[in-house]
Image: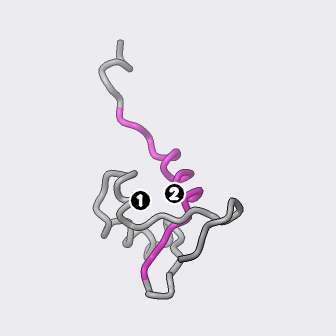
Amino acid sequence: MATRTPDTESLLTPAEVATMFRVDPKTVTRWAKAGKLTSIRTLGGHRRYREAEVRALLSAVPQPRTEADSL
């Protein structure tokens, strides 16, 4: 198994991205096919997503308001 070096970019699986956005992993795959998210293919054909890009996209999503926000 290859070891990661500090300069290696962190990659996420579709399930990990889906958990962050609270959506189904199939939705993440649809976003990649639509060009909303860049995917990298592994040698086995699986999709992986750059963590930095995913976090940037997540920060652009408006967060739902809570009761504490309206007080």
Q: Quadrant of residue 45?
A: bottom left
How far is mark 1 from mark 2, CA to CA?
7 Å
Which segment is the magenta one? 46-64
Q: For residue 64, which numbered disc appears in the image?
A: none
Q: Front-most of 44 and 63?
A: 44
Q: Residue at x 48, y 49 (%)?
A: 58
The color scheme shown is one colour
Q: Position of residue 32 (x, y in %)?
A: 45, 72
What count of labels does the image hold? 2
Q: Residue at x 34, y 18 (%)?
A: 68
Name the element at disc 2: helix
Q: Give the residue number, with chain letter if any, for mark 1.
A: 17
Q: Is residue 53 magenta?
A: yes
Q: Is residue 49 magenta?
A: yes
Q: Earlier in the sequence, mark 1 or mark 2?
A: 1
Q: For residue 54, which numbered disc appears in the image?
A: 2
Q: Front-most of 42 and 52?
A: 42
Q: Position of residue 55 (x, y in %)?
A: 53, 51
- What's the amino acid at mark 2? Val
Most distant residue in the right direction = 7
Q: Residue at x 35, y 12 (%)?
A: 71
Q: Front-most of 15 and 27?
A: 15
Q: Is residue 6 above or below residue 61?
A: below
- C-beta proximity under 8 Å, tags 1 and 2: yes
Taking 23 as reference, is 39 left or right?
right
Name the element at disc 1: helix
Crowd band around label 1 with a 10 angstrom C-alpha radius: few (<14), some (14–19), many (20+): many
Q: Residue at x 62, y 66 (%)?
A: 4
